Amino acid sequence: NRNDKTARIAHVFSGTFVHSTLRAAVEILQNCVLGVDDKGKIAFIENHQDVVSLSEIWGFETSDIKQLGQYEFLMPGMVDTHIHASQYSYTGTALDLPLLEWLNTYTFPVEAKYKDLDFANNVYTKVVRRTLKNGTTTACYFATIHTDASLLLGELADSFGQRALVGKVCMDCNSAYPNVKPVVTPRFAPSCSSSLLSELGEIANNNKLHIQSHISENKEEVELVKTLFPDCKSYTDVYLKHNLLTDKTVMAHGCHLTDEELEIFRETGSAISHCPNSNISICSGMLNVRNILNHKVKLGLGTDVAGGYSPSMLDAMRRTIDTSKALTIQDPQHKTLSFEEVFRLATLGGSEALSLDDQIGNFVVGKEFDALRVNVCVPDGPIDLFPGECPKVILEKFLNLGDDRNITEVYVAGRQVVPFPDTK
Ligand code: GUN
Ligand code: FE
């Protein structure tokens, strides 16, 4: 608010801003100015014609304004609601087995290596840098069972400046990082006893912590859960009975959830992380996102590295559309997701899924400035533009054709984190 004289302005951008609101999946603000205060929060977003009075009120020099070019815009940072940092070393490989065999053959042997902190440091550094460079300003990470390596992942996210939730978590070493938080992480029902699930539910509820896990990813897993928890009505009921479904819960996949189970998600305020690359890559299923949205269940997108082979949230958006189109091919009545809707899922939707929508997700005064500077016209870049293309078309081209070359700057909580200080 303009009367807050204690806040000083750290950055001012002028040009085109693209974001989602509750009413519009895509809102394009042209000829606007956006100010970020020295606490990393959005201080104002106004019409450019008011820039002189804004500079007087807020005490910034108009010569310090960062002017975005004709082919540039700012968009909110992307939120990866589900990514296994520990699986990044083999991302792009090992996609030839279904989930349960995939876990035993590839995943568990690799994750065992994280007792070695040098191994962990190498992979975790690379995954944080790669995802930041690709515009993931918030990542909800699975680490491994190793406390020291999990703490190291938190330390690396903090030092590179990424906002993150990190599980597994050691509750007696609560982190003091401003933008990195612990998340209680039962791997999934088949690998947790009832008493472990209960204890984790209690820890999460007593400490108001986030919770993440997997649910109903493939059919074999759903059948396995039925035999392991015969007293529970459904997979969802397993987590419900152990107090693991809260408004700070995000469950990955959910491909095979019934409408009845979705009702429980809606009632508890729990969210689903849609991981379309993974769902196709290891042949788990096709989540009907339209049905999830119709049930008013919170939903974000996830890469699910390394079940998903790409660490990029742009890929997660494209695969979300592909899956939606495949569902339309099967059933022409199915209403395909639009690119605007998918843009919202990758930004505002992700922030809702992680219960961070009071802090991040779009450009609203008072929220933290997590943003990407996008230039669709970089030299030798992946996008060709033609005369007369409007900002909406330019956004659509970026979402379908763009890559990290087009993401020229990344900001988290007002701090510029890409380009990395060592490469600037
Ligand atoms: N279910 C339990 N663990 C995992 C995992 O590591 N990846 C995926 N995709 N599903 C899981
Ligand atoms: Fe996963």
Image (tube, rainbow, N blue to C red):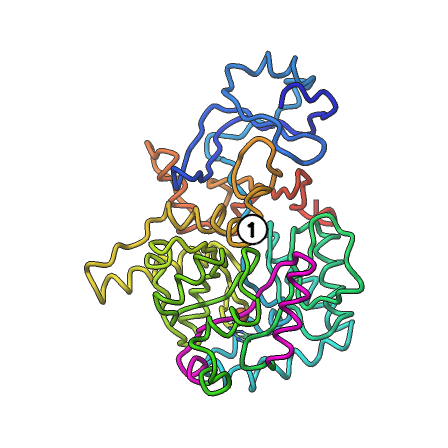
Residue under numbered circle 1: 355
Q: Is residue 207 magenta?
A: yes
**Where, by quadrant of the figure, is residue 208 drawn?**
bottom right
**Quarter holding the C terminus?**
top right
Front residue of 408/120: it is: 120
Residue at 54% x, 77% y is 189
Above or below — where is 124 with respect to 179?
below
**Where, by quadrant of the figure, is residue 340 drawn?**
top left
Residue 255: where, in percent of width, then height? 39, 69
Residue 53: where, in percent of width, then height? 59, 12
- Residue 170 lies left or right of residue 264; in this view the side is right
Residue 207: where, in percent of width, then height? 69, 58
**Where, by quadrant of the figure, is residue 234 drawn?**
bottom left
| Residue at disc 1, CB closer than 8 Å to ligand 2 | no
Q: Residue furthest right?
A: 173
Above or below — where is 19 with respect to 3?
below
Residue 24: where, in percent of width, then height? 38, 38
Q: Which amino acid is tagged 1?
A: Ser
Residue at 36% x, 66% y is 260
Above or below — where is 275 with respect to 90?
above
Residue at 44% x, 51% y is 345
**Quarter holding the N terminus?**
top right
Q: Is residue 213 magenta?
A: yes
Residue at 54% x, 52% y is 79
Front residue of 383/364: it is: 364
- The number of numbered discs placed on residues in the rendered structure image is 1
Magenta span of residues: 194-223
Determine the main secondary structure of the stretch shown in magenta.
helix
Front residue of 224/117: it is: 224
CA neighbours of label 1 inside 10 A, class few (<14), some (14 to 19), many (20+): many
Q: Secondary structure at mark 1?
A: loop
